[in-house]
Every structure is written in structure tokens, then in C-alpha cells.
Image: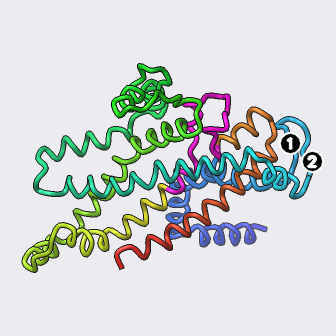
Amino acid sequence: MLEQIKSQTQKRRKFWNEERKEAFSGYLYISPFFILFAVFGLFPILFSFYLGFHKWNGLGEMEYVGLQNFKWILTDPIFWKSLSNTLIMWVLGTLPQIIVGIVLAYALNSAIIKMKGLFRVSIFMPYVTSTVAVAIVFGVMFNSQEFGLMNVIIGWFGMDPMSWSTSEWGVKVAISTMVFWRWVGYNTIIYLAGLQGIPKELYEASVIDGASVRQKIQFITIPMLRPIIILTVFTSTIGALQLFTEPLIYIGRSYREEGITVVLYLYREAFANLAFGPASATAIILFIIIIVLSSINVFITNRIGR
């Protein structure tokens, strides 16, 4: 008996050698991230996929309904309206910020601009500003009354005052402007970091060859920035398709059709109508749409500058 105990103790000592102890200690150090990711990241994703095939109000028992939630969503005109709104706001708010971001980054990287540090901080400030504060300020700017700032501006061009909070295109323009203002500085700083990685010798050689500014941008800047452009297009597409806070604050809990987005539609189904099954089905459909559009964007962007 004593020999058996000694043998087991020796086996434990052999198993817990210094190498295994160090490895176990390392896993313990990194385990909080994986535990938190599993609880707050992986589990909600898997549960949402599971819930998409069930009927559930959040409190009672779940009922398996197969693809019924998906059929209901895909035949709901409000869902298609929210999808078209999201795509329109993506075009109006995201594509201009990528183009303007490249131009601003090129200007901030040139020798013409003085006080570059001040301009770089100023242009990045909208990104760190509270989204709620941004939505409130833009709500005042896009006031539907005649004395609203935007109505005063369009009045200078002879246009009648516009109802920015209820008209079909007024709501989309207001929310898209909000998204553009908040994210253009973020993309500009990323492009600026990419520009500073381009060797100056390329520009010096192009000057010797007599290249114009347009030729420098077309044949040096854009091709060298292509990986950065792909990154920003990818992240901007995902962010635009998940647009939620700005329309929620701007149009409120009325969920009007003029400004409802896919994520806002999902939120309404889950927390206003207590239909968690259709809400989860919407999340799955949105996930597929993001994959498809991101793949198309990357395919097109890969051909820029070739």
C-alpha cells in the first residue's frame, strides 16, 4: 500500500514538471479573455442562431417553428423597407467619407498644411464624441422649422423649408450626414498612417519624371494605399449595415418607416413586440447580407489601382 502511494506521488511529480507548470500558468493568465468571450460573445451568437428557429417571448417556453420566422421576416414589407433604408444610408454616409477621407489625409500629409497636429486632433474629435450628443446636436441642426439651420441654408438657394424629421429623404439625409461627420475623421487618420508608410523616394522620383499631382495620386498613392482602403471599406460596410444609435435617437421609438434600419427593426421586434424568434432570424439574415456585401466590396476594392 505504501509503495502504491509512493508510486502515485512520483507520477504526479512527473506530470507536474516545470514545463507543464509554466504552460498552465500561462493559460491561467489568458483565460479571462476567453471566458468573457465565451460568455458575452460566443454564447449570444450561438443562442441567437438557435432562437431563430423558435417562437419565444422572452419569458415562456420556447416552441420550435422551423423556418417560419424567416418566412415571416422575408414577407414583411417593413423589413424590406428597413433594408432599403440601410443601403441608401450606407451609400450616402459611407462612400463619401472614404473618398473625402483620402483627400483630407493627402492634404494633412503634404508640406502645404501648417499646424498639422492641431488639424489632426480636430478632425479626429467627432469619433470620440458621444453618439447621443451628436444625434441631439444634429437634431437641432435639422430642425423642421423655418429657423432650423439646414432650412436656413437651403433657403439661400431658393428652396422651400424641408421636414427633416418626417419626409422620406429628409430623414435619410440627416442620419447619413450624422454618420459621415462622425466617421470621416476616423478613416482620415487611418489613411494618414498609410500615407506615412509610403517611401518618399517614390514621390521624389515621380517629380523628376515630371508627374502631376493627379498622376502621383493615381499611380503611387492609391495603389500603395490599397490594403488600407480594403480595410476601411470592409469595416465601414459592416458599421453602416449595423446602423442603430443614430436613427434610434433621431426618429425616437416611433420606428417610422422613413428612418428605420435593419438593426432598429431587429430591436423593435425583440424589445417592443417581444418576438425574439423573428428578431434572431433578422440577425441571421443581416449576418448573411454583411458577408455577401463585404465580399463584393473587397472584390471591387482589390481591383483599385491595378
Q: Is residue 14 above or below residue 256?
A: below
Asked if the residue at tag 1 contacts the one at tag 2, i.e. Cβ–Cβ closer than 8 Å, the answer is: yes
| Residue highlighted by disc 1 | 56
In reply to whether residue 249 is colored magenta, the answer given is yes
| Residue highlighted by disc 2 | 63
At horizontal 42% and vertical 76% (from top left) the residue drawn is 303
* Residue type at numbered disc 2: Glu
Position in image of residue 19 (x %, y %)? 50, 70
Q: Nearer the viewer, residue 306 or 33?
A: 306
Label 1 Cα neighbours within 10 Å, binned few <14 / some 14-19 / many ≥20: some
Q: Is residue 121 above or below residue 287?
A: above
Name the quarter where the C terminus is drawn. bottom left
Position in image of residue 99 (x %, y %)? 36, 57
Residue located farthest toward the left when viewing the structure as drawn? 208
Instruction: Please state the extent of the stretch shown in magenta in the rendering.
Output: 237-263
- Secondary element type, mark 2: strand
Q: Nearer the viewer, residue 239 or 77?
A: 77
Name the quarter where the N terminus is drawn. bottom right
Res 51 seen here: no
At horizontal 37% and vertical 65% (from top left) the residue drawn is 228
